Image (tube, rainbow, N blue to C red):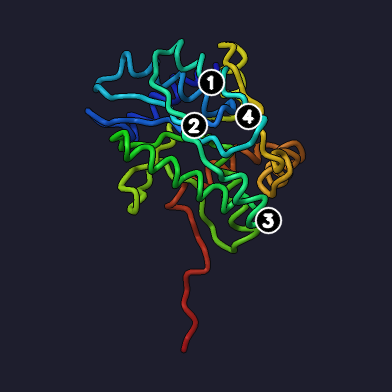
Amino acid sequence: MKKSLSGTLRKTVETYGLIQEGDRVAVGLSGGKDSMALLLLLKRYQRYSPFKFHLEAITVDMGFNNFNLEAAKQFCANLDVPYTITQTDIAKVVFEIRDEKNPCALCANMRRGALAQTMNERNLNLLALGHHADDALTTMFLNMLYTGKINTLEYKSYLSRADIHVIRPLLDAAESQVIGTVESERIPVLKSPCPMDKHTKREDVALMLKQLYKEVPNSRKNLLTAMRNEDKCNLFAIRPIK
């Protein structure tokens, strides 16, 4: 029997100590399926958590004219979660002023900066993001293919400049679990207004991996095991003789 997404989140949070007593948590709410599902499940977890924590949601509005946030506003209101929309001109900077040919990295950094500033203003110390296990696999392959590094997403990391921690409570969950929860709970999902949506290297690598899973039995399971198994990681660690 497949584990529920709620159960996966609870186990991940408690196994890795992602949230502690008195933490003030902000969900980075993009409006996509992952962040919307994360907000719902963290709100439910808040009710039976062994420790008390505060929960809010923050959306960075990048300045696209066609980005309608009404569904997100209503979703947060129904959950009784405080919701902040941070207005920015990131879209103009990235696509007009800078005219970036590969805009995703700059956009991500600017959005993270805007989130951190809003969190500092609202005295929030934990930023919860909706990345799941399939995102981690995609990130690992992106780094290997385009940067020559074996590196992926972390359960918890620290942004020293902003003095906040980033947590990923869904990092042990499969994307299929998220999709199933969104469908069964009828969670609203906002369409991304970004012109790069579905046209990125990340999307290309994700599609490549999905094709690999079809062609090689158990490949997804084995890749997840390899990614998590530090003790069995055997790389070129021998230094050449000088």
* Residue type, mark 4 in image: Phe
Q: Which residue has dot 1 on it?
A: 72
In front of the other: label 1 or label 3? 3
Q: Secondary structure at mark 4?
A: loop
Vertically, is 122 above or below 241?
above
- Residue nearest the viewer, comparing 89 with 170: 89
Q: Quadrant of the N terminus?
A: top right
Residue 53 numbered mark, or none: none
Whether residue 160 can be seen here: yes
Where does residue 96 sit, x and y in percent of width and height?
67, 51
Q: Are marks 2 and 1 in contact (CB under 8 Å)?
A: yes
Q: Which residue has dot 4 on it?
A: 67
Residue 59 numbered mark, or none: 2
Q: Are marks 2 and 4 in contact (CB under 8 Å)?
A: no
Where does residue 119 sit, x and y in percent of width and height?
36, 37
* Residue type, mark 3 in image: Asp
Q: Quadrant of residue 207?
A: top right
- In the image, is 194 to the left or to the right of 26? right
- How far apart are labels 3 and 2 at the CA level? 24 Å
Residue 99 numbered mark, or none: 3
Where does residue 50 sit, x and y in percent of width and height?
25, 20
* Residue type, mark 2 in image: Thr
- Residue nearest the viewer, comparing 241 with 101: 101
| Residue plotted at (38% across, 25% down) | 56
| Residue plotted at (34% across, 30% down) | 25
| Residue plotted at (58% across, 53% down) | 105
Vertically, is 64 above or below 236?
above
Q: Earlier in the sequence, mark 2 or mark 1?
A: 2
Q: Secondary structure at mark 1?
A: helix
Vertically, is 6 above or below 204?
above
